Amino acid sequence: MIAAILALALGVSAPSDQASTQPAPPPQEDQAVRLEDIQVTGRRLDSLIESFVDEVAAPNRGRGIARWDRSVCVGAVNLRRDVAQYLVDRVSTVAEDLGLNAGDPGCTPNLLIVATADGDAFARELVEKRRRALRMGGTGMDRGSTALKDFQDASRPVRWWQVSMPTDSETGQRAIRLPGECTNACSGPMDYAPAFNVASASRLATQVIDNIFRAIVVVDVTKTGDVNSAQLADYIAMVSLAQIDPTADTSAYASILNVFSEPNSAAFLTEWDKAYLEGLYDAQRTQKNLRAGTTEIESSIRRAHSRLAAEAETTTD
């Protein structure tokens, strides 16, 4: 099964009839804080924003926050054809709204959505048989063995795994070498070290940024409950286009991340979610301070709040 799925990840498409959409749940009053409803500014607003970002963001250990760079190709397998196409189109649309090229039809997927009737068994088999594809061994490329064990063992409706690459922002080349990779005669430690030219040395700035280049999202169709296809697509977009902590507690905020515990909580990406993603994809990411990326996301959420407040004031005038 795993070999077939990985073959599909390399560009072969063979949808089947294992899952279908669910009817949309009736609207219900939000119990969590909506960004557009916050009436305060200053410390309390800052505290809410910082808490949300700290809860949600999950950069790799010792690395800056990562995102897709320039393009992403979304694929979906083991779903009825129309459902698979809907998921691919919706995630691709969110990616395009963030400035990414979503790829032409027939592109080789590097973001693969896999539907299964047994997510636990699939995750175990994937980790057992293709661990090296999930943990390539380069420094800062994934969230580590503890997170991989959580991916394998935690029984969730949707689970995901991303691999990112420290990259020279000037050239687009890898800023690390993979295990066993070397240059010249492979005779000394410098032959195994990453090599790239530094355009300008700085204590505050860095050329090295982190780019997601591979992601797999596993959907257990027996656990999606009353979540409809629109909610599922936006949930997948959120967790695959950003590095999201699967253990995050976002119950205090109106977010698509709550949709499996509270199906009526969000029909689509919320203002919190959209502002988070927009901040991530607007971030410069060239500061050495690892906190800088999340600070830029926080600024994006503040701007979104100001815009929503201004729109509300205009409506009431």
Image (cartoon, rainbow, N blue to C red):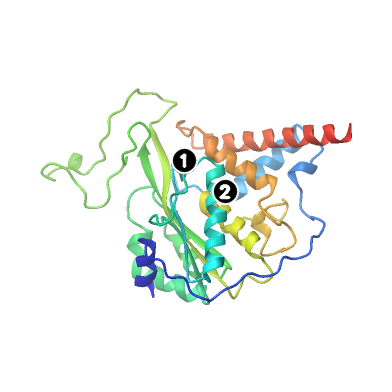
Q: Residue at x 36, y 40 (%)?
A: 167
Q: Is residue 242 above or below residue 301?
A: below
Q: Amino acid at mark 2?
A: Val
Instruction: Give the residue type at disc 1.
Output: Gly
In front of the other: 283 or 40 = 283
Image quadrant occupied by the N terminus:
bottom left
Residue 237 drawn at (x, y percent): 56, 54
Residue 194 vs residue 98, the one in the foreground: 98
Residue placed under numbered mark 2 in the picture:
94
Which quadrant of the figure has residue 235? bottom right
Q: Rounded to the nearest whole Å, what is the CA distance between mark 2 and mark 1?
A: 23 Å
Q: Which element carries disc 2, helix, strand or loop?
A: helix
User: Which residue matches tag 1?
Assistant: 64
Left or right: residue 275 versus residue 132 is right
Q: Position of residue 311 (x, y in %)?
A: 78, 34
> Which numbered disc, 2 or 1, marks the residue that appears first in the sequence?
1
Q: Name the secondary structure under disc 1.
A: loop
